[in-house]
Image (cartoon, rainbow, N blue to C red):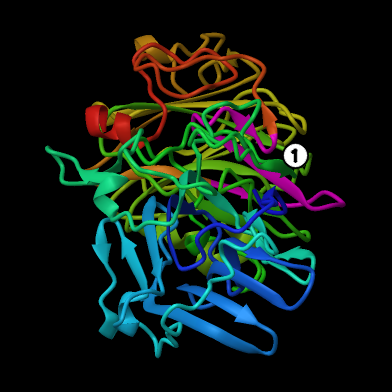
């Protein structure tokens, strides 16, 4: 959602001394830059913000003029691109103890005061900028001097702002009775106050709608979109921390972790955030690039903790995960769809096999992986048609297990997706649909879910195959 903003200007002040902010968040870009989740600001040098610092710590502050009015920063770094977090910020300047005036809770647990980084606390009975009509709200960025900056790239869910009262994390979330995982309460019982709001994002045609009853709807600019990735079901995305890219402070992960941007004439690689040890799995990929270079566009699966899983990081432009060898057999399999004669690579035992029909830019490549047996199988197809088994006229049929592109020994470890992308005259993305229903900012034109009713795909998901997400991993992976 980078460069996208939800904005609201209130006509009057709320309670400027007591308030609560609660939201769920999943980072998808981890880079050495500041990323603001939300804040308020005016056209002058006054603003408030909750943001990630370049080192991954989390900061909340009010800024007035040339000096910080107050600043509270965690020592803990939030660098996980695989999980959802729940944050609650309690602001109450009426408290007599300075450290009680700003409280931060993460997944239901308060950040201890002694783990904060040299906080500057607000004075007692300070009027916060957060609830001032002179400051406009901005969600998805920082608002300063009349401009939006430091855009957030990731997912946000269930944003609650409570005007005039304190609400603790148990109001908004609870521990799952089976797993102990912290999960959201979908309809929290709170008193919002006159300026409070609740952004559920449950209507894709009106994502800025307020569900608090106050009708404080937010205006939208940019390409905000509804996602099937939620705190209750976390989908696979691309792992920005494990990407091979041109420099460590410039991310190539785009579209909330569902695309990887190829730059220059070299391949840039990135793995997914989730891996599977069993079950049957389906995903779709849409390369923007038409580059036919042997290494430039690949769709792969790799075994965790092996040379293949890190091959692209140590080898650079020559990186093809399926082109590594091991005495333990297969560690990675890669498909090269853009070549004149597409190839399937398994240097750990399967060799190099001609497979399928050449893809063009913006074709949709389907992948089905069956990890349900010691001898596992993988199929690829294009635009709704599965390829024939190599060297035959026998079409692949994933749901029956017939005619795979390759059979391989899966071993006892976990397997996960990996892609590379490069440009062909301009920077180009490899778009990945793990069930989120989008290729970049474009929604799929069909609405095919898996047999568990999960995900949205362009093409029919083979029977018994599933989207890669926590709900399905729990049941099948």
Neighbours of disc 1 within 10 Å: few (<14), some (14-19), many (20+)? many
Which picture quadrant has residue 415? top left
Residue 436 is covered by the magenta coloring: yes
- Residue at left offset 43%, top offset 57%: 164
* Observer-nearest of 469 and 105: 105
User: Going by the image, does 341 lie left or right of 199?
Assistant: right
* Residue that mark 1 sits on: 288
Asked if residue 266 lies left or right of residue 100, the reply is right
Q: Which residues are magenta?
A: 419-441
Residue extending furthest toward the right: 425
Foreground pick, 9 / 277: 9
Residue 393 showing in the rendered view? yes
Estimate the x, y position of residue 186 in percent, counting from the top left. 35, 34
Residue 436 higher or lower than 147, as above or below: above
**Residue 153, above or below 468:** below
Q: Quadrant of the C terminus?
A: top left
Q: Residue at x 24, y 62 (%)?
A: 109
């Amino acid at each position: 959602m980078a460069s996208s903003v939800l904005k609201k200007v209130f006509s009057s002040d709320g309670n400027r001394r007591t308030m609560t902010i609660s939201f769920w968040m999943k980072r998808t870009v981890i880079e050495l830059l500041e990323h603001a989740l939300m804040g308020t600001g005016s056209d002058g040098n006054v603003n408030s913000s909750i943001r990630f610092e370049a080192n991954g710590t989390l900061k909340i502050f009010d800024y007035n003029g040339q000096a910080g009015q107050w600043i509270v920063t965690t020592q803990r770094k939030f660098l996980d691109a695989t999980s959802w977090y729940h944050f609650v910020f309690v602001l109450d300047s009426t408290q007599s103890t300075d450290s009680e005036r700003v409280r931060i809770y993460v997944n239901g647990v308060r950040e201890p005061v002694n783990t904060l980084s040299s906080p500057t606390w607000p004075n007692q009975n300070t009027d916060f900028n957060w609830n001032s009509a002179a400051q406009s709200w901005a969600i998805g960025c920082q608002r300063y001097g009349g401009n939006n900056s430091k855009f957030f790239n990731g997912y946000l869910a269930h944003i609650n702002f409570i005007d005039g009262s304190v609400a603790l994390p148990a109001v908004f979330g609870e521990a799952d009775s089976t797993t102990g995982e912290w999960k959201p309460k979908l309809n929290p019982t709170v008193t919002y106050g006159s300026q409070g709001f609740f952004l559920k994002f449950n209507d894709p045609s009106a994502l800025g709608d307020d569900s608090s009853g106050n009708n404080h709807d937010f205006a939208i600019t940019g390409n905000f979109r509804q996602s099937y990735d939620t705190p209750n079901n976390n989908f696979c995305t691309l792992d920005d921390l494990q990407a091979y890219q041109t420099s460590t402070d410039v991310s190539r992960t785009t579209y909330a972790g569902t695309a990887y941007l190829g730059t220059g004439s070299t391949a840039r690689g990135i793995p997914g955030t989730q891996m599977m040890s069993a079950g049957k799995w389906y995903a779709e990929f849409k390369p923007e690039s038409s580059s036919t270079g042997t290494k430039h566009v690949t769709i792969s699966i790799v075994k965790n903790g092996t040379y293949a899983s890190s091959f692209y990081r140590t080898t650079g432009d020559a990186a093809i995960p399926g082109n590594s060898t091991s005495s333990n057999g297969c560690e990675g399999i890669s498909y090269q769809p853009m070549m004149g004669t597409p190839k399937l690579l398994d240097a750990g035992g399967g060799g190099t096999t001609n497979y399928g029909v050449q893809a063009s830019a913006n074709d949709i490549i389907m992948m089905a992986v069956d990890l349900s047996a010691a001898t596992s199988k993988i199929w690829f197809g294009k635009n709704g048609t599965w390829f024939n088994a190599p060297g035959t006229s026998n079409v692949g049929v994933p749901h029956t297990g017939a005619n795979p592109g390759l059979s391989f020994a899966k071993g006892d470890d976990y397997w996960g997706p990996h892609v590379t992308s490069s440009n062909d005259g301009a920077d180009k993305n490899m778009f990945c649909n793990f069930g989120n229903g989008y290729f970049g900012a474009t929604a799929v034109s069909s609405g095919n879910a898996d047999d568990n009713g999960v995900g949205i795909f362009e093409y029919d998901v083979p029977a018994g195959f599933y989207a890669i997400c926590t709900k399905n991993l729990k049941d099948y992976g």
